[in-house]
Amino acid sequence: MKRRLTVLFAAMAAGIAMLVTPGAASASPAPYPAVQSQIDEVLAETPGGVQTGPRTVEWNDGAVGMKFGIESWEDCRAEQVCFWEHDWFQGRFVYINSSECTNRTFDFKAWGFNDMTSSWRNNTSRNVYVFQHDALGGNRLWVEAPQQNAGALDPSIRDDASSFYCV
Ligand SMILES: [Ca+2]
Protein backbone atom coordinates (compact mmCIF):
# COMPACT_ATOMS: atom_id res chain seq x y z
CA MET A 1 0.00 0.00 0.00
CA LYS A 2 2.76 2.36 0.90
CA ARG A 3 4.41 1.82 -2.47
CA ARG A 4 1.15 2.44 -4.32
CA LEU A 5 0.66 5.70 -2.42
CA THR A 6 4.18 6.73 -3.30
CA VAL A 7 3.45 6.07 -6.96
CA LEU A 8 0.20 8.00 -6.68
CA PHE A 9 1.86 10.99 -5.07
CA ALA A 10 4.59 10.94 -7.69
CA ALA A 11 1.96 10.97 -10.41
CA MET A 12 0.10 13.83 -8.71
CA ALA A 13 3.34 15.80 -8.40
CA ALA A 14 4.05 15.24 -12.08
CA GLY A 15 0.55 16.45 -12.92
CA ILE A 16 1.02 19.62 -10.87
CA ALA A 17 4.37 20.24 -12.53
CA MET A 18 2.67 20.01 -15.92
CA LEU A 19 0.05 22.56 -14.87
CA VAL A 20 2.77 24.97 -13.80
CA THR A 21 4.77 24.50 -17.00
CA PRO A 22 2.29 23.79 -19.79
CA GLY A 23 5.02 23.72 -22.37
CA ALA A 24 6.89 20.91 -20.61
CA ALA A 25 7.93 17.89 -22.61
CA SER A 26 6.10 14.55 -22.53
CA ALA A 27 3.43 13.73 -19.94
CA SER A 28 4.22 11.12 -17.32
CA PRO A 29 2.56 7.76 -18.01
CA ALA A 30 -0.60 6.73 -16.18
CA PRO A 31 0.11 4.63 -13.06
CA TYR A 32 -1.10 1.37 -14.64
CA PRO A 33 -1.21 1.86 -18.41
CA ALA A 34 -0.80 -1.83 -19.20
CA VAL A 35 -3.60 -2.68 -16.79
CA GLN A 36 -6.04 -0.24 -18.39
CA SER A 37 -5.41 -1.67 -21.85
CA GLN A 38 -6.07 -5.17 -20.48
CA ILE A 39 -9.29 -3.90 -18.90
CA ASP A 40 -10.37 -2.25 -22.16
CA GLU A 41 -9.80 -5.55 -23.94
CA VAL A 42 -11.91 -7.51 -21.46
CA LEU A 43 -14.72 -4.93 -21.52
CA ALA A 44 -14.78 -5.05 -25.32
CA GLU A 45 -15.26 -8.81 -25.43
CA THR A 46 -17.53 -9.39 -22.39
CA PRO A 47 -20.96 -7.77 -22.45
CA GLY A 48 -22.20 -6.79 -19.00
CA GLY A 49 -18.81 -6.02 -17.51
CA VAL A 50 -18.44 -2.71 -15.67
CA GLN A 51 -15.14 -1.12 -14.63
CA THR A 52 -15.58 -0.23 -10.95
CA GLY A 53 -12.02 0.83 -10.10
CA PRO A 54 -8.56 1.41 -11.58
CA ARG A 55 -7.89 -2.34 -11.52
CA THR A 56 -11.35 -3.91 -11.26
CA VAL A 57 -14.10 -5.07 -13.60
CA GLU A 58 -17.32 -6.53 -12.18
CA TRP A 59 -20.27 -8.51 -13.47
CA ASN A 60 -23.61 -9.52 -11.93
CA ASP A 61 -23.68 -6.52 -9.56
CA GLY A 62 -20.27 -7.40 -8.13
CA ALA A 63 -20.93 -11.09 -7.45
CA VAL A 64 -18.23 -11.85 -10.02
CA GLY A 65 -15.18 -9.72 -10.69
CA MET A 66 -11.74 -9.54 -12.21
CA LYS A 67 -8.70 -7.74 -10.80
CA PHE A 68 -5.60 -6.79 -12.74
CA GLY A 69 -1.97 -6.29 -11.71
CA ILE A 70 -0.05 -6.74 -8.44
CA GLU A 71 -2.27 -9.57 -7.28
CA SER A 72 -1.53 -12.18 -4.65
CA TRP A 73 -2.99 -14.98 -2.60
CA GLU A 74 -4.49 -12.56 -0.05
CA ASP A 75 -6.59 -10.85 -2.72
CA CYS A 76 -8.92 -13.86 -2.75
CA ARG A 77 -11.31 -12.88 0.02
CA ALA A 78 -13.40 -15.03 2.37
CA GLU A 79 -16.25 -16.82 0.59
CA GLN A 80 -14.66 -16.34 -2.83
CA VAL A 81 -13.44 -18.84 -5.40
CA CYS A 82 -10.51 -17.40 -7.38
CA PHE A 83 -8.69 -18.32 -10.58
CA TRP A 84 -5.38 -16.67 -11.61
CA GLU A 85 -3.83 -16.12 -15.00
CA HIS A 86 -0.32 -17.19 -13.88
CA ASP A 87 1.30 -19.59 -11.44
CA TRP A 88 1.46 -18.69 -7.75
CA PHE A 89 -1.52 -16.33 -7.80
CA GLN A 90 -0.06 -13.78 -10.21
CA GLY A 91 -1.54 -11.76 -13.03
CA ARG A 92 -5.20 -10.99 -13.49
CA PHE A 93 -7.68 -13.12 -11.58
CA VAL A 94 -11.37 -13.89 -11.57
CA TYR A 95 -13.27 -14.10 -8.28
CA ILE A 96 -16.79 -15.29 -7.70
CA ASN A 97 -18.78 -15.17 -4.47
CA SER A 98 -19.79 -18.58 -3.17
CA SER A 99 -23.47 -17.62 -3.01
CA GLU A 100 -23.36 -16.76 -6.72
CA CYS A 101 -21.61 -19.89 -7.91
CA THR A 102 -23.49 -22.50 -5.89
CA ASN A 103 -25.44 -24.90 -8.09
CA ARG A 104 -24.85 -22.83 -11.22
CA THR A 105 -22.64 -23.44 -14.23
CA PHE A 106 -20.30 -20.72 -15.47
CA ASP A 107 -18.21 -20.46 -18.62
CA PHE A 108 -14.95 -18.57 -18.18
CA LYS A 109 -15.42 -16.97 -21.60
CA ALA A 110 -18.11 -14.74 -20.07
CA TRP A 111 -15.20 -12.87 -18.44
CA GLY A 112 -12.63 -13.19 -21.23
CA PHE A 113 -10.85 -15.88 -19.18
CA ASN A 114 -11.27 -19.03 -21.26
CA ASP A 115 -8.26 -21.40 -21.16
CA MET A 116 -6.32 -19.02 -18.90
CA THR A 117 -6.27 -20.53 -15.39
CA SER A 118 -2.83 -21.45 -14.02
CA SER A 119 -3.45 -21.33 -10.25
CA TRP A 120 -6.49 -21.20 -7.99
CA ARG A 121 -7.74 -20.75 -4.44
CA ASN A 122 -11.04 -21.95 -3.04
CA ASN A 123 -11.67 -19.74 -0.02
CA THR A 124 -15.18 -21.13 0.60
CA SER A 125 -16.88 -24.13 2.20
CA ARG A 126 -18.04 -25.36 -1.23
CA ASN A 127 -16.57 -27.90 -3.61
CA VAL A 128 -15.71 -26.57 -7.06
CA TYR A 129 -15.63 -28.75 -10.18
CA VAL A 130 -13.68 -27.46 -13.17
CA PHE A 131 -14.09 -28.69 -16.76
CA GLN A 132 -12.18 -28.60 -20.01
CA HIS A 133 -14.89 -27.23 -22.30
CA ASP A 134 -17.88 -24.88 -22.04
CA ALA A 135 -20.97 -26.02 -20.13
CA LEU A 136 -19.10 -28.71 -18.13
CA GLY A 137 -18.00 -30.47 -21.34
CA GLY A 138 -14.85 -32.47 -21.98
CA ASN A 139 -12.71 -33.81 -19.15
CA ARG A 140 -13.17 -32.82 -15.55
CA LEU A 141 -9.79 -31.19 -15.02
CA TRP A 142 -9.73 -30.86 -11.24
CA VAL A 143 -11.83 -30.60 -8.08
CA GLU A 144 -11.30 -27.83 -5.52
CA ALA A 145 -12.02 -28.95 -1.98
CA PRO A 146 -13.03 -26.27 0.54
CA GLN A 147 -10.17 -24.05 1.71
CA GLN A 148 -7.68 -25.58 -0.72
CA ASN A 149 -5.45 -24.07 -3.39
CA ALA A 150 -3.07 -24.95 -6.20
CA GLY A 151 -0.15 -22.61 -6.91
CA ALA A 152 1.04 -24.26 -10.11
CA LEU A 153 -1.21 -26.51 -12.14
CA ASP A 154 0.28 -29.42 -14.04
CA PRO A 155 1.01 -28.43 -17.67
CA SER A 156 -1.48 -31.06 -18.83
CA ILE A 157 -4.37 -29.07 -17.33
CA ARG A 158 -3.00 -25.51 -17.22
CA ASP A 159 -4.67 -22.95 -19.51
CA ASP A 160 -7.46 -25.38 -20.34
CA ALA A 161 -10.29 -24.63 -17.89
CA SER A 162 -13.46 -23.44 -19.65
CA SER A 163 -16.31 -23.95 -17.16
CA PHE A 164 -17.07 -24.82 -13.52
CA TYR A 165 -19.74 -25.16 -10.91
CA CYS A 166 -19.85 -25.12 -7.09
CA VAL A 167 -21.86 -27.28 -4.69
CA1 LIG B 1 -10.77 -25.39 -22.53
Image (cartoon, rainbow, N blue to C red):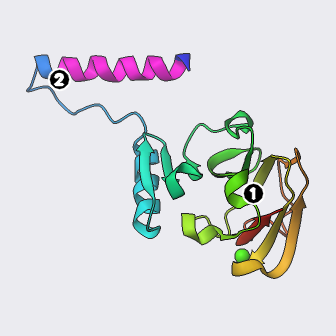
Disc 1 from disc 2: Cα separation: 42 Å
- What is the magenta range? 3-18
Q: Which mark is residue 18?
A: 2
Please tell me which residue lies in front, 89 or 155.
Answer: 89
Secondary structure beneath dot 1 equals: loop
Residue 159: name its quadrant.
bottom right
Lower position in the chain sequence, tag 1 or tag 2: 2
Disc 1 residue type (three-letter): Ser
Disc 2 residue type (three-letter): Met
In percent of the image, x 77 and y 52: which residue is there? Answer: 119
In percent of the image, x 46 and y 46: which residue is there? Answer: 35
Q: Which mark is residue 151?
A: none
Percent of width and height locating residue 36: 41, 48
Q: Is residue 13 above or below residue 30?
A: above
Outermost residue on the bottom side: it is: 138
Return the residue at label 1. 118
